Image (tube, rainbow, N blue to C red):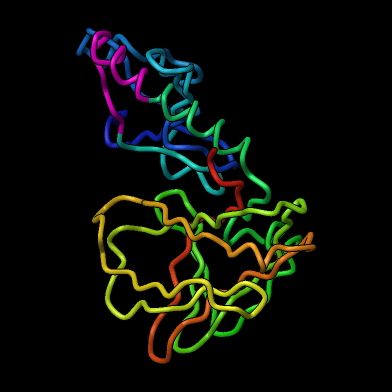
């Protein structure tokens, strides 16, 4: 969306948001001029009506907050279908949250400190609104997770499906290898989860466990985008 030559962006605040929470346009009217109200013409502030009252402003004026420039648009009938998809995702997320014993928001300073993060040759960044972390050329990163004294637990890790090449690494719990992983670009252009069962003997009489991702020589461990410890599904 442009105001003359100025590219306008939807301002989304400073906090991370889920994909299903990103505003979309819902209308049977294809005339964009009917969707926008002027809030402050001098400051080039506008309100986009066919979303949840999203503020539009010049892209160049947004410094620290998240924003969007490209928009998904649905007709009213199309939105009814898409809304059901989002609702299913919400219910799945709530069910996962109910099973979660501990959750580490990867690459965020305070959550990593809270989980006693350590590492060598490890790097972090952001991609598609998600933080990632990896370790390179024999490096590693580790963190401590709370088991809530559960006798059973799985580790769910989120990767990006286009990552491949030399990405072989080991996953260890309290220095015991539980999985050997190699990322092979198995789901291009999308994120996916892998679940690793933690042997019960590594959980017995423990309230905390140390998770480590260790890169093979000349390889990269990750990128890891999310990590949570969960109770197995019934």
Quarter where residue 221 is shown: bottom left
Residue closest to the eye, 212 or 152? 152
- The image shows residue 9, relative to residue 35, as above or below, that is below
> Which range is magenta?
71-85
Residue closest to the eye, 23 or 59? 23
Residue appearing at x 60%, y 78% in the figure? 176
Q: How many marks?
A: 0
Image quadrant where one finds the N terminus: top left
- The image shows residue 212, relative to residue 33, as above or below, that is below
Give the prevailing secondary structure in the magenta stretch.
helix
Residue closest to the eye, 206 or 188? 206
| Percent coordinates x, y for residue 113 in the rendering | 74, 64
- In this view, which residue lies farthest toward the left? 30
| Percent coordinates x, y for residue 71 in the rendering | 31, 31
Residue appearing at x 26%, y 55% in the figure? 187
In-image side of 187 versus 18 (left or right): left
| Percent coordinates x, y for residue 146 in the rendering | 74, 56
Residue appearing at x 54%, y 77% in the figure? 177
In-image side of 97 versus 180 (left or right): right
Residue 57 magenta-highlighted: no
Image quadrant where one finds the C terminus: top right
- In this view, which residue lies farthest toward the bottom? 217
- The image shows residue 40, relative to residue 22, as above or below, that is above
Residue closest to the eye, 38 or 126? 126
Quarter where residue 24 is shown: top left
Residue appearing at x 31%, y 66% in the figure? 163
Residue 72 magenta-highlighted: yes
| Percent coordinates x, y for residue 5 in the rendering | 27, 36
């Amino acid at each position: 969306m442009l105001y003359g030559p100025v590219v306008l962006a939807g301002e989304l605040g400073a906090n991370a948001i889920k994909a299903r929470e990103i505003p979309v346009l819902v209308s049977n009217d294809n005339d964009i001029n009917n969707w926008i109200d002027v809030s402050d013409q001098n400051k080039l502030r506008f309100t986009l009506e066919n979303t949840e009252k999203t503020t539009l402003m010049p892209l160049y004026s947004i410094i620290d907050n998240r924003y969007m420039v490209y928009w998904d648009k649905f007709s009213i009938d199309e939105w009814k279908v898409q809304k059901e998809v989002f609702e299913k995702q919400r219910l799945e997320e709530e069910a996962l949250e109910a099973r979660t014993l501990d959750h580490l928001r990867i690459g965020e300073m305070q959550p990593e400190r809270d989980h006693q993060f350590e590492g060598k040759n490890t790097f972090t960044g952001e991609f598609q609104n998600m933080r990632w972390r990896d370790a390179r050329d024999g490096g590693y990163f580790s963190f401590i997770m709370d088991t809530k004294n559960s006798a059973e637990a799985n580790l769910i890790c989120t990767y990006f499906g286009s990552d491949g090449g030399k990405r072989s690494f080991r996953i260890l719990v309290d220095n015991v290898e539980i999985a050997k992983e190699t990322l092979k670009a198995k789901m291009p252009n999308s994120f996916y989860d892998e679940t690793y069962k933690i042997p019960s003997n590594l959980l017995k009489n423990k309230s905390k466990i140390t998770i480590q991702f260790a890169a093979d020589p000349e390889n990269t461990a990750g990128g890891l985008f999310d990590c949570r410890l969960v109770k197995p599904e019934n």
